[in-house]
Image: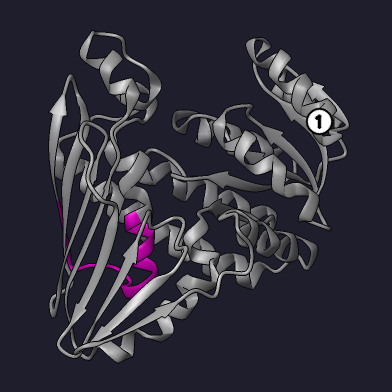
Amino acid sequence: MKLLIAGAGFIVSDFLPITKDLPKTDIVGITGTPNDLDQMKEYQNKYHIEECFTDYDQALKETAADTAYVAVPNFLHYAFTKKALEAGKNVICEKPFTVKYDEFRKLKNLAEEKKLILVEAITNQYLTNYKVLKDHLSDLGQIKIVSMNYSQYSHRYDAFKQGKILSVFDPQKGGGALMDLNIYNIHFIVGLMGMPKSVEYKANIERGIDTSGVLNLDYGNFKAVLIAAKDCAAPVTSLIEGDEGTIQVDGPANVMDSFDIFKGQDKIHIDEKVYPHRMYEEFRAFEKMIDDHDLVKDKEALDHSDQVMQVVQKAIDSAGLKLE
């Protein structure tokens, strides 16, 4: 794929080093704000990016890109993705897909109308360890409890307490613990178990934003508790508990370095990752999906994201959050 990167922040700096190992990805352009220009020039020189732009519309028009990678702040995902689709580009959009469910539906319909690939960059759905874990769920017997905790103290919370509102704590920019961290937990469980029967989000809200919160999902025959926090920290871990065994994943749900299966006194450690970096497998999958123009595979991914966005919207409504 001929890729145009929209954005110049942390996720882009994290992604670019693996591009040397993506044989079907050719980065033909990068676009950002004028304030990003020095950083983009550095990326351009280091990673052999063909062109650099400070105007997104110009970049969409003038590059040879067939695909846009939308890696801008959450609140811009909808507008940037819509423009790229309207320009006839496939789109890889960073998580969360959009801030509002109805925005996601509009993008999904537009992509289907234009027969373009539209996919969410959400690492855990493509990791081999995640797929292997799914195969081992039957080892646990009847699932009873799922508990996930992604609590990671943000240094930006210190500024927030002093009255400085950065994007990750800005309700006008789609910030908050739900959208930044719990989104990984939601993808993880929905990818395994599908849609819950009910959603309830109990959030610690300061100045209109959820700095931390507990998401309760009722699946009928089992219950799930998803915790995420940016105002405190804890060991990051996930447990899937059944009446015949337990799976434990240490570390964030978007990394899945390995996991353990406990049955009685026995412990089985599993690690089948194929590459050290979490983003590699998703982008290999995107390369193939776009190269093959595989709309069937794309629909599967979009249907998953649709369920996730429904859960997110229900959580936002439940907590009374007003995100833009």
Rendered location of residue 255, percent (x, y): 46, 57
Vertical side of 20 occupied by 36: above or below: above
Rendered location of residue 310, percent (x, y): 32, 55
Answer whether residue 177 is magenta in the image: no
Vertical side of 276 occupied by 292: above or below: below
Quarter of the rendering occupied by the C terminus:
top left
Badge count: 1
Observer able to see residue 82: no
Q: Quadrant of residue 276?
A: bottom right
Instruction: Rate crowding at label 1 as few (under 14), some (14 to 19) or many (20 or more) other CA atoms within 10 Å.
Output: few
Q: Nearer the viewer, residue 294 or 161?
A: 161
Rendered location of residue 80, percent (x, y): 59, 32
Q: Which residues are magenta?
A: 185-200
Answer whether residue 195 is magenta in the image: yes
Rendered location of residue 91, percent (x, y): 65, 47
Q: Secondary structure at mark 1?
A: helix
The amino acid type found where label 1 is placed reads Lys
